[in-house]
Amino acid sequence: DADEPRRRDPIPRYEAAVADYGTAIARDPACVLAWAGRGNAWSRLAMLRNKWGKNPSSAVAQAVSDYDAALRLAPGCVDALIGRGNVRLRDGLIAAVRGRDPTERFEQARVDLEEAVRRAPANLVARNDLGMLFLQRGNAAAAAGGDPAPERARALAELDEILRRRPEYWPALRTKGQLLCEMGRFPEAVAAFEAALKLDPGNPYVAELLRRARAEVGK
């Protein structure tokens, strides 16, 4: 089927979403949800382009610009703060993989995500993203020859707070497992991944993380 690759490729769907949100913005430039929604679509496009070996920079810039517009209209928009923080976090990860300094991007992400948590303490997505940010800042510190312990301690505290609020929130269990692996605490990581997989059966990413953690325990 010649159309099969097109159906498997999610990029056209997000490009269509960008266009649809653009139409909504043209009709109502004061619609915060449209600006934030288009930011989300650009953010997803950036990650997909990077995954498939394409340059994500323009999509990242477009996402940040749209989140900025949403926040000018509604400075307390938690969804826009989370979105902007997340895309800056991911952009920092891309920079680190490509040998560039992620510090500025990570710091911008921290400001956004901490503000989101301040405004909405019960928002677990914001807290989980913040935990992941501290985890990655710890990794960056280690890669630069510094001490990752302070950042990893902040990550662990954030993730434990999520699980105190909602023990069944599997994304936090996944992120905690990743953190525990970085800390060399592989048996605890296995337990976290097993708990996450029990809550989200069939998740291939968590299953692979569990396999790797078990392999480390067996060494």
Image (cartoon, grey):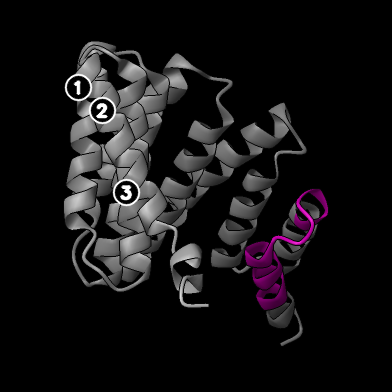
Check disc 1 and give the amino acid type: Ala
Asked whether residue 202 is drawn in magenta, I would say yes
Asked whether residue 93 is drawn in magenta, I would say no
Task: Return the x and y of residue 8 as percentages of the image width and height.
Answer: 50, 66
Task: Return the x and y of residue 202 as percentages of the image width and height.
Answer: 76, 62
> Image point 57% across, 39% down: which residue?
157
Number of the label disc, if any, that sits on residue 108: none
Task: Return the x and y of residue 167 as percentages of the image width and height.
Answer: 76, 36
> Can residue 137 be seen at all in this image of the molecule?
no
Left or right, 9 with respect to 62, comes to: right
Mark 1 neighbour density, 10 Å: few (under 14) some (14–19) many (20 or more): few
> Can residue 186 be seen at all in this image of the molecule?
yes
Judging by the rendered image, the residue that carries numbered circle 1 is 26
Judging by the rendered image, the residue that carries numbered circle 3 is 15
Q: CA distance from mark 2 to mark 1?
A: 5 Å
Contact between labelled residues 2 and 3, with CB atoms less than 8 Å apart: no
Q: Which quadrant holds the C terminus?
A: bottom right
Tell me the element at label 2.
Answer: helix
Check disc 2 and give the amino acid type: Thr
Task: Return the x and y of residue 136 as percentages of the image width and height.
Answer: 41, 56
Tell me the element at label 3.
Answer: helix
Please provide the residue range marked out in magenta. Answer: 197-213
> Image point 70% across, 45% down: which residue?
170
Check disc 3 and give the amino acid type: Glu
Q: CA distance from mark 3 to mark 2?
A: 13 Å
Contact between labelled residues 1 and 2, with CB atoms less than 8 Å apart: yes
| Badge 1 or badge 3: first in the primary sequence | 3
